[in-house]
Amino acid sequence: MPLAESARRFPQSGIATPHYLASAAGLATLARGGNAVDAIVAANLALGVVAPYFCGYGGDVFAIVWDGRAHGYVGSGHSAAAASIDALRGEGLEHMPYFNGHSVTVPGGPRGWFDLLERWGTKSFGELSQAAIGYARDGFEPTVRGQGMITEAGMFYGPGFEWPAMYSEATVGTRLRQPALAGLIERLAEGGPDAYYQGEVAETIAATIQRRGGLITADDIAAHRGEWVDPIRAGFRGAEILELPPPTQGVTALEMLRIVDGFELPPDGPERQHLLVEAAKLAFADRDTYVSDPRHMTVDAAAMLADDWTGDRRARIDPRRASSPEPYRVPTGGTAYLCAADSDGLLVSLIQSNFLGFGSGIHVDEFGINLNNRGSSFNLSEGHANAIAPTKRPMHTLIPALGLRDGEPWLVFGSMGGDAQPLIHLQLLTRILDDRTELQAALTAPRFNVEAGRWRVKTEWHMPAETVAGLESLGHRVESIGPLEMGVGHAHAIELGPDGGYAVATDPRAEGAALGL
């Protein structure tokens, strides 16, 4: 049953993003007769300008689109053709760096926007990019949240990076202008994806990466192609949840759901959260052992979702005691999730990212591009599924999602949050399906994340005190995080209501807006 009581509450099209200006760009596109894909691209183009600490023109993009059936798009960039464990170890590296040329993979986002438009778009890239060009050329005023994100990133990266000079004037009450980025978007509008992946832009990106020690060449950039895939699926509480296959961690989200689906969850409180934490630990440990570019995996996604696999993991959970499986890394994600729906039933679940905030910290001055550091997800361990290798895609945290009931769309949802994204999906779905929580309330409710190494549970400041105390009594090490911290993600969602309308909701932890017509 839909969560709302009246069809009159439901707009016939809508969009939700983590920045109000991007949402406005998407809504304006819908108002001009564009469809959901047009709107999501317009919003994403604007988002890369007004929220560069989340995503942008040097990152990757992933999407699930419903047009009567589900289509997956993997816009994941790859490593250099010359990349190898020996090459990096020969430079004295023992671990993948976060902030140098080796951490950059070929950006997949720009080609992804064009691939989506080629298949479903009704408006030209030139028309859809007008809001983004205006925000870049004429400027926009950062929010308090945006100013804080930029200031925090400056402290995080430290000295020696070029990008802070571009954003040093990004303060509340001033206009941040990015003329080089405006010029890049205009090039894309005129020349299509080849204007990015070939010629001057590609050569300049490659030269910038190489100055920072990386191996990517203009030929590597020209070789990039996105991939159309079938989403992978798993049942949960009578619904069917769709995620993207490897190299994304979509299989990890589904593994968590499959483990938890075998439990009759206690009421919201420490015993329930304990089971969710323990399921997450086991699924994350499997992810970091097996998930990578599918060409290099020894265990496929289907095996990790099979009854025997998930049943074995479920049986390992002690309902009265916290466990300590092998640790995994939890970097802070710099990612944006956005979703859109239109009156014809076209639905888009999309996520785009630089990875950690401003990515690698490498800024292509000539074109205003902040390059990703997705390559930092690789490792330097011989024989490991996610070891760096030539033209390989790393394990990717980005996972847009879609929920079905009786084979028909019910929920378009996702979240930023780096490695925490599968756990955020799990928490949202348990609130909606187990507790029958209204959509906006489910997004607003307290969430938690699980930290690497010591497996600390990081709970939001408004998590009930009795839940925190109960988790500690079960052996969990709990740390409270303050309001508006990114460790529990920014989730957004669209629920299909009666008569084809939608409920659109956005996360209060972001600076976004949920808008509809």
Image (cartoon, rainbow, N blue to C red):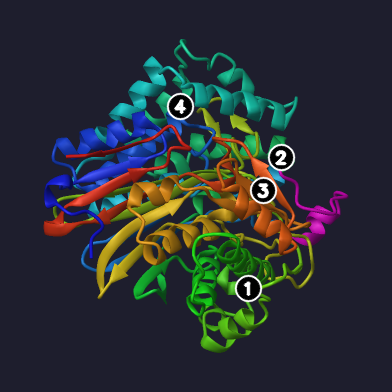
Distance CA(mark 1)–CA(mark 3): 23 Å
**Visible in this render: residue 255?**
yes
What is the number of the mark on residue 296?
1
Distance CA(mark 2)–CA(mark 4): 22 Å
Q: What is the three-letter code of the residue carrying label 3?
A: Pro
Q: State whether residue 375 is above or below residue 322.
A: above
* Disc nearest the viewer among 3 and 2: 3
Distance CA(mark 2)–CA(mark 1): 25 Å
Q: Which residue is mark 2?
A: 99
Range shown magenta: 83-100
* Disc nearest the viewer among 1 and 3: 3
Residue at figure coordinates x 14%, y 55% from the top left: 344
Residue at figure coordinates x 23%, y 40% from the top left: 124
Distance CA(mark 1)–CA(mark 4): 36 Å
Binning the other alpha carbons within 10 Å of mark 3 as few (below 14), some (14 to 19) or many (20 upward) gives some
Whether residue 160 appears in magenta in the rendering, the answer is no
Residue 339 location (% of width, % of height): 33, 48
Q: What is the three-letter code of the residue carrying label 4?
A: Leu
Please name the predominant secondary structure of the magenta segment in the image.
loop
